[in-house]
Amino acid sequence: MLKKDVKANKPMKVVIIGNNVAGTFTAQNLRFLNEEIEIEIYTQEAYPYYTRINLPEVISGKKLIQDLIVFDEDWYKTKDLKLFLGHKAEHINLENKTVHFSNKNKSINYDKLILALGSTPNIPPINKAVEMKNNKQGVFTLRNIDDALEIKNFIASIPNEKAIVIGGGLLGLELANQIKDTKLKTTVVEFFPRLLPRQLDEECGKMLKDEIERRGIEVVLNATTQEILGNGKVAGIKLKDGRQFDAGIVLIQAGINPTIDLAKNAGIKTNKGIVINEYLETSETDVYAVGDCIEYNNQIYGIIPACMEQSKIIAATIIGAKTKEYDGTIPKNTLKIMGLDLTSIGIINPVEGEGGSWDILKKADVKDCCYQKIILKDNKLKGAILFGEKKAVSYVYKKMEEDVNKDELRKLLDLYIYRCEKCGDLYDEAKMGIAFEDLPNDYKCPNCGASKEYFRKKID
């Protein structure tokens, strides 16, 4: 059991700044480990913990605010967690161990301070982007409920029926999908040569692009936005190559920047994020950081699995049980993109020269918009892309970094070998990459020239 403060005969007071996924689950894990510590959570938002994944659906009207709330205020009371909404932290006094809140004109003391400050949307160096966003002239970023409501109201007020989403990442694509459902003609503009470059390889990225365009959303790749067009209100964008696109609203979803100013101004070590060690400790005694705001070994994570993993380690650290060290988080995402299941985990594009023996099992079913790719190294599972198919998700998560049985994998992924009955030549879907059924009807055996109808599925 955690020791009490002998002087005051009171339990330890832990203050958490931030009510996001990292802050909320850190609080929950702390309470699970110890029933006596006093836990206070402060957030500048007006809502208890909610999921940001469904924010785009608030814009299209498919979700209401209450649909996004994960833990209501009764949940906090049940867990004996004190939640303070509408509190914007302005200054940390490390010597006195206090935090001052500007809009409440008050300070609170702490024994342990946890910074779960999250992140803010990144705005690339686009001429007039920041100015037009700050002046509410039709340029927006989406990070919280208030942003979603503001975008929804703006769309209802504009006559222009075109929208542009700058950024083809996970949130950008879902945002584009929901914007399209507000009856706006929507274009996604992506800097990289493919969509979701961190989650998909080139082949799967093309499959996703084709599917998105089939659903009525234009996709422009290799596109650097140079300027927001318009005088007083947005009229469109201009690309670096000179092309222009008209729009009545521009939404920028181009990654995140860790929120570090509160820590930096207090003298806590920061770089791109708040620098932490393997126990989520900052450079200052009794101050910790977790979630999107942190930097560990020069790495910024900004993904929910990292927040969840870190929240367990930091809780143990706070109560003095340093039983596990943080060693980074394997990138992994399991979600829906426009209704299509996508899982991306670990290494998706092996680099030659990394050593070891790499093996790739792959199957692309264009007709059914399904793509499966398994990456092995020395027979260990190192990464996977599962798009449009979720049957193998639990297996992949369970077996990461473990030895796997290739025959078991083939069966799980429906990867078959077809044998030519004329010459015995084999068509291995796992090696060829394309589903046999997707081959053209005039396909010929490369060995003997036999037609497709002479191939039979090899069972043994």
Image (cartoon, rainbow, N blue to C red):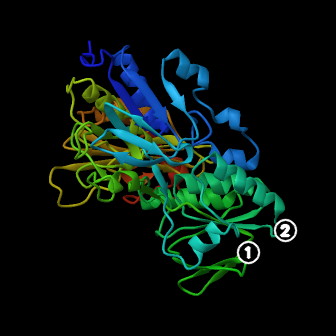
- Tell me where residue 229 sits by quadrant: bottom right
Secondary structure of the residue carrying numbered label 1: loop
Q: Nearer the viewer, mark 1 or mark 2?
A: 1
In this rendering, position of residue 186 left or right of residue 271: right
In this rendering, is residue 94 above or below 442?
A: above
- In the image, 58 versus 134, the foreground residue is 134
**Residue at the image position 48 percent from the left and 57 percent from the top:** 196
- Label 2: element kind: loop
- Residue in the foreground of this view, choosing between 304 and 454: 304
Q: Residues within 10 Å of mark 1 (few under 14, many from 20)?
A: some
The three-letter amino acid code for the residue at tag 2 is: Pro
430 to the left or right of 178:
left
Q: Residue at x 53, y 22 (%)?
A: 76
Residue at image mark 2 = 159
Q: Amino acid at mark 1?
A: Lys
Q: Nearer the viewer, residue 3 or 444?
A: 3
Residue 391, compared with residue 254, is above or below; it is above
Q: Nearer the viewer, residue 432 or 375?
A: 375
> Can see residue 356?
yes
Q: Earlier in the sequence, mark 1 or mark 2?
A: 2
Residue that carries the numbered disc 1 in the rendered image: 233
Q: CA distance from mark 1 to mark 2?
A: 12 Å
On the rendered image, what quadrant is the C terminus found in? Answer: top left
State the residue at coordinates (44%, 44%): 100
Going 25% across and 19% down the picture, which residue do you hit?
A: 7
Image location (x, y in percent) of residue 228: 62, 77
Locate residue 162, reporting x and y percent.
75, 68
